[in-house]
Amino acid sequence: MGLCLSTPSTLSKSNDLYHLDCMSDRKGSDFLRKLSREFNPGCDVAIVVFAGYFDAGGRKIRQVALQQFFLESQHEAQLAFTCDEYDIDFAFQYFMIASNNLVTLESTVDETTMNEPLSHYFINSSHNTFISGAQLFSESSTQSIKRALMHGCRVIELDCYDGGSSGPVVMHNGIATSSITFRSAIKTIYEEAHTTSDYPVIITLDNHCSRTKRDELAQILLQELREKLYVPKESFKRVWPSPAALKGKILIRDKHKVAENFCRCMVKANVSGKIISTFEFTRNKRCAIHEGLVEARVSHSKASTFPEINQTPSISVDLRSIVQIDNMKFGTFSSAASGENVFSCSWSEATLLHQTQNAQRDVLCAFTERHILRCYPAGSRVMSGNFDPSMAWSIGAQMVALNFQANDEPIWINRGKYLANGACGFIRKPDYLNNNGLQMLVEPMLLLEITVLACSGWDIFLNERNPSLSPDTCICISLSGSKLDAESRMTSVFSSRARTGPSAQPYYNETFNFRVFEPELSVLLITVYDKSAAWKDRFLAQSSYPVALLRPGIRLVPLYDKFGKYVGDDNATACVVIKVKQSMTRL
């Protein structure tokens, strides 16, 4: 075996229009195909990376030293060594700029954690999912719903109104947005619900329909969702089903406008000449739906697919009978704690702020341990901007509904968070959020050190107004996802007269330390800005990851545009090389 000097080859990968690169290409093949691999000679990055492991005079690293480097710095065994020694520049390009050296690897679903009640999970959620842009004047579109689902969303919000002869519609009322039919929205959800994840999708209805149209909503849901529709057997629930039990299903969440003593009330309803309670009436409706669906499936047992729409059992359905998640008005924490049944409620951004300022965290977490809380952006965000989801996650709110069309910083943080658990859209909350008996965190659990070394691919960031100018680049390293860990650090500004080539690539070798209280909640966000006088803080790129999934050592950070696609084009992209060091402060 001799000295290796060859260059590694990479493979290309096509990307679906609706998929995010940051979720669909965790192996990094397409990213590496487009990366230039040029670094600034002002920072000999190979020397920085392998410092202490090689003969500085000869720029060679022996196999034994390289093995030691992988064990000590990378915390992994590297067995694919075919040479006695390597040129350090080649070793850096071959082993560090590699598809298996991204800052996180492709995560997989931990099936053992998916059998607890729904209230024990963070659920990837959207707000006004059907709107394609700003709240006031953009179009409603089924493509927006499809995009959210393809981006990992599990909770779809539809604003429902009576409509006209074509049936109920989905729209943002009182403003200049267009509408789509409720049926077309439900068809899209049926088709795309389980394309990226087998776990359940929840349709939350902001329901403004009349009673007659509510019955029509129910019929459409039965007809279009067919075998995927989850119909509860009981009107009241003492515990939520688990994500594992709901695989392949679609659940309905809707307002439940009933009195608190509904279980005991005897509102009369005349059904087939028999006077029964409202509770019994609704329960019988649920049984009728189940019996009708079972009967239809048995009669078509030899068919390869579920019955066509016109073969769906004709059942007069009260919408409440197919609602699994009752959205009720929040009363008090004490009444929620003492009640036998679980429920869901919604808090606006302002209500969330008010409650977190006036209630202890353990009280809030005890509530979200049993009940499902959905938080949504303020109505004043007319351009569909989002709020920081960190506070809601910190109190265990399961559904932090964000405007997926905004493509702003909260969305980038959300994308990073839901890379965890195989990007299935459900992440089990930390034990201390699911068990109110556990002590809340008062000390940091993790010491995180991030060193920003160097960058490559900066040719793609030439100033759009003046292509002769390269950006004055700085990189922001921030933690989000937990209010205890919210912190940001900024590198110095790198400037270069070079437009392209090695000298145009920024380098820093700057280190930042973070004390992390809640690593299971925290998300690392890396944002790149152009600080030149003409642009001030022009956004260039971003990348975000769950802190719990970060890999120690020298790692590659692919950079994405605001939409979640690789920056650049089909032929070029960019990256940042960082060093990650982690140490637990306590077990």
Image (cartoon, helix red, strand yellow):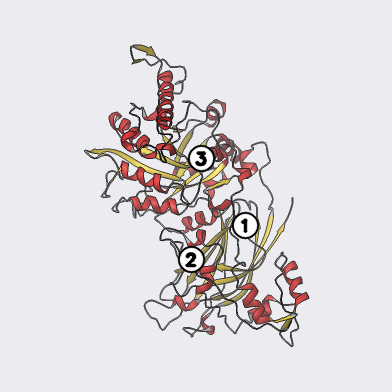
Q: Residue at x 36, y 77 (%)?
A: 465
Give residue 193's position: percent from left, percent from top: 44, 46
Contact? badges 2 and 1 (CB < 8 Å) = no
Residue 468 screen position, x and y as percent: 41, 84
Q: Which residue is mark 2?
A: 560
Badge 2 or badge 1: first in the primary sequence: 1
Report helix, strand or loop for mark 2: loop
Element assignment for label 1: helix
Q: Amino acid at mark 2?
A: Tyr
In space, the residues marked 3 and 1 are separated at their CA atoms by 31 Å
Q: Amino acid at mark 1?
A: Leu
Asked if residue 208 can be seen in this view, the reply is: no
Residue annotated with mark 3? 355
User: What residue did someone put label 1 on?
Assistant: 549
How far from the left and from the top, in percent, is residue 110? Answer: 61, 48
What amino acid is labelled 3 in the image? Gln
Up/down of 378 relative to 260, above or below: below
**How far apart in space, not on screen, are marks 2 and 1 (Cα)?**
18 Å
Measured from the top left, where is residue 439 in percent x and y? 68, 41
